[in-house]
Image: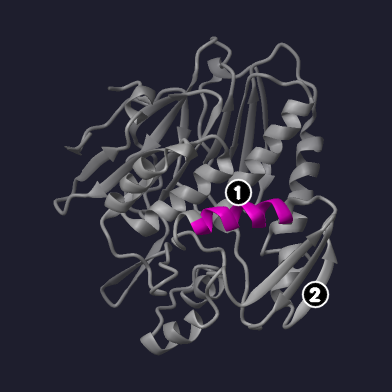
């Protein structure tokens, strides 16, 4: 479905906002009438929210915080002692123990998505993220020479070998500049981890959100699917307006967008989505990609990959890979202060506003 869209849609139930991995994002709002059990907290530089629509709740906020702390201790690049930070700081080889197994799971899933997307999703972009200033929110455009230099360290299928033996990780670097950045998948994966935790505690109907990445199970308190709003892509707006409503259950959804995280320097705009092949921020017209997937880690990672690919390639990718069970909803700039809407086959069945 295609068309130029400039309309507004009334906010309904839950708002999802675009996110970029483990960086800060605003918290979605929820109508009070929808809440039977609500848990909130801070994590990964943003916030989390859990809504349970069961008659009983079998966990506490403290237990959720404990799970998330353990997750960060494995995968946060902002914690110097985390497993990923230790591996990144090593110059040749390092063997460490990761009792949670979070690093292994994230690495192996990232490897699958890297291969499936032909490198559009690449967790080795960490040196580029830092170089362009997005790690520290610094406006730092790079010269062609600097980009070429950093590209020598990029390539998830290069520069290292890794072995997993139980809880043990052994990383051998052939290039000391090789570093990993799972920010484009780890936040979604942390949502899945909380989902597994709630499943173990016997919860059947719930909503989990971390920084705009969502996993929905069962029904809400009204006995219907959860209603999620997709943002209008307005540059760095402090408020959210809803472009459309998605009705969803027993799947995950994540939105990546270039319209909130960018900087402008000397008349040029630099979005935080970096093409691992060129080393430069993407320059196409795609403003946001909302992906529905079986897991939140997949939704998160593929949303990022599609922002790198652009709209045409993203739609073709979903069409060519039905086995992945992905649905995508895209908003592109139309060059006239509006935007174009397109979506993959099957996505329209999720839309409440159509």
Foreground: 269 or 156? 156
Q: Position of residue 105 (x, y in %)?
A: 70, 51
Q: Position of residue 168 (x, y in %)?
A: 84, 61
In this picture, is 105 found above or below 213? below
Q: Secondary structure at mark 1?
A: helix
At label 2, counting other C-alpha atoms closer than 10 Å, the crowd grade (few under 14, some 14-19, many 20 or more) is some
Numbered disc total: 2
Judged left or right of residue 315, residue 82 is right
Q: Position of residue 46 (x, y in %)?
A: 60, 49
Which segment did they paint magenta? 104-115
Instruction: Report the residue marked by disc 2.
Output: 94
Q: Which mark is residue 168?
A: none
Disc nearer the start of the sequence (2/1): 2
Instruction: Report the residue marked by disc 1.
Output: 187
Q: Secondary structure at mark 2?
A: strand
Q: Quadrant of residue 184?
A: bottom right
| Quarter of the figure with the N terminus | top left
**Residue at x 55% of width, y 19% of height:** 32
| Quarter of the figure with the C terminus | top left
């Amino acid at each position: 479905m295609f068309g130029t869209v400039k309309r507004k849609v009334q906010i309904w139930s839950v708002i999802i906002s675009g996110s970029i991995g483990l960086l800060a994002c605003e918290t979605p709002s929820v109508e009070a009438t929808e809440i039977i059990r609500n848990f909130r907290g801070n994590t990964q530089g943003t916030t989390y929210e859990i809504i349970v629509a069961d008659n009983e709740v079998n966990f506490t906020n403290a237990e959720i915080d404990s799970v998330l702390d353990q997750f960060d201790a494995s995968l946060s690049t902002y914690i110097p002692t985390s497993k990923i930070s230790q591996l990144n700081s090593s110059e040749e080889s390092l063997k460490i123990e990761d009792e949670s197994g979070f690093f292994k799971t994230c690495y192996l899933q990232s490897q699958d998505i890297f291969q499936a997307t032909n490198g559009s999703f690449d967790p080795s972009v960490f040196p580029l993220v830092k170089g362009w200033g997005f790690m520290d929110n610094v406006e730092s455009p790079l010269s062609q020479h600097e980009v070429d230099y950093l590209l020598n360290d990029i390539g998830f299928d290069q520069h290292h070998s890794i072995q997993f033996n139980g809880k043990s990780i052994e990383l051998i670097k052939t290039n000391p500049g090789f570093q990993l950045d799972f920010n484009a998948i780890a936040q979604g994966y942390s949502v899945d981890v909380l989902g597994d935790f709630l499943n173990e505690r016997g919860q059947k109907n719930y909503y989990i959100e971390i920084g705009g990445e969502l996993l929905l199970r069962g029904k809400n308190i009204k006995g219907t699917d959860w209603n999620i709003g997709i943002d209008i892509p307005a540059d760095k707006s402090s408020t959210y307006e809803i472009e459309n409503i998605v009705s969803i259950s027993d799947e995950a959804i994540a939105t990546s967008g270039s319209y909130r995280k960018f900087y402008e320097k000397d008349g040029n705009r630099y979005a935080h989505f970096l093409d691992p092949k060129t080393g430069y921020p993407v320059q196409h017209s795609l403003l946001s990609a909302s992906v529905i997937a079986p897991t939140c880690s997949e939704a998160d990672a593929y949303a990022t990959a599609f922002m790198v690919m652009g709209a045409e390639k993203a739609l073709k990718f979903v069409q060519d890979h039905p086995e992945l069970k992905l649905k995508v909803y895209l908003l592109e700039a139309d060059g006239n202060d509006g935007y174009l809407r397109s979506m993959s086959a099957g996505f329209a069945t999720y839309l409440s506003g159509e």
